[in-house]
Image: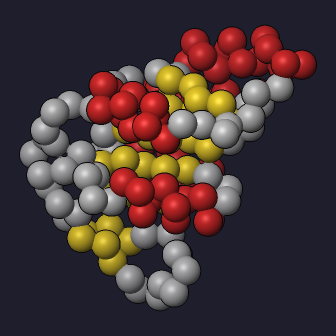
Amino acid sequence: MALEQDKQPNSTENEVQTMDDRKNTILIYSPDLNFCFSLSMLFQDRYNVITTTNSSMLDSFVAHYSANLLIVDAAPSEKMLSRVHALKELNRRLPIIMLYVFNPKEAPLDRAVRKEVDAVFYKPFDLAAVSKRINELLPTTASV
């Protein structure tokens, strides 16, 4: 399966990433292109990685590609909470991990986010803990 990626540093408009059907696929959203790139470099040896910096593309990616897990790097907001809820409606089995900076003034929003997603990690986060949670949430083999 071939998939066109968001533009990465030094990539071209027509660059196509080949997906390995033996690997699980992680979809990563962050408005920060460098953060997307860094996470994709960290996980690409174990997973197929799709990244996007465009939150409006998440619905399309979840609906049309076989992502096994979604990582969302975004500040909690009513809009993002609504988007995550809509993504869960598209694919109820899709595990979602959110990464953000905790703000004690927004504790009610934090609680609401935790009801919608499978895991929350506050920045700065421990990459080993995130990796462990990914392993717990993903099936042991990719579905073919």
Colouring scheme applied when the structure was drawn: secondary structure
Measuring from the top left, give residue 10's x and y in whole percent. Answer: 51, 87
Residue at the spot x=27%, y=59% of the render? 45
Would you say 65 lies left or right of 89 here? left
Q: Is residue 59 visible?
A: yes
Measuring from the top left, give residue 93's x and y in whole percent. Answer: 33, 25
Total numbered badges shown on the rendered structure: 0
Quadrant of the image for the C terminus? top left
Q: Is residue 64 visible?
A: no
Q: Quadrant location of residue 115?
A: top right
Q: Nearer the viewer, residue 136 or 12?
A: 136
Residue at the spot x=43%, y=69% of the render? 5
Q: Nearer the viewer, residue 4 or 111?
A: 111
Would you say 70 lies left or right of 120 here? left
> Is residue 35 shown above or below 58?
below
Q: Nearer the viewer, residue 4 or 114?
A: 114
> Is residue 133 shown above or below 47?
above
Would you say 133 lies left or right of 119 here? left
Residue at the spot x=41%, y=57% of the render? 42
Residue at the spot x=47%, y=27% of the render? 88
Measuring from the top left, give residue 137's x and y in whole percent. Answer: 32, 27
> Is residue 33 shown above or below 77?
below
Would you say 144 lies left or right of 83 here? left
Q: Nearer the viewer, residue 5 or 86?
A: 5
Quadrant of the image for the N terminus? bottom left
Q: Quadrant location of residue 18?
A: bottom left
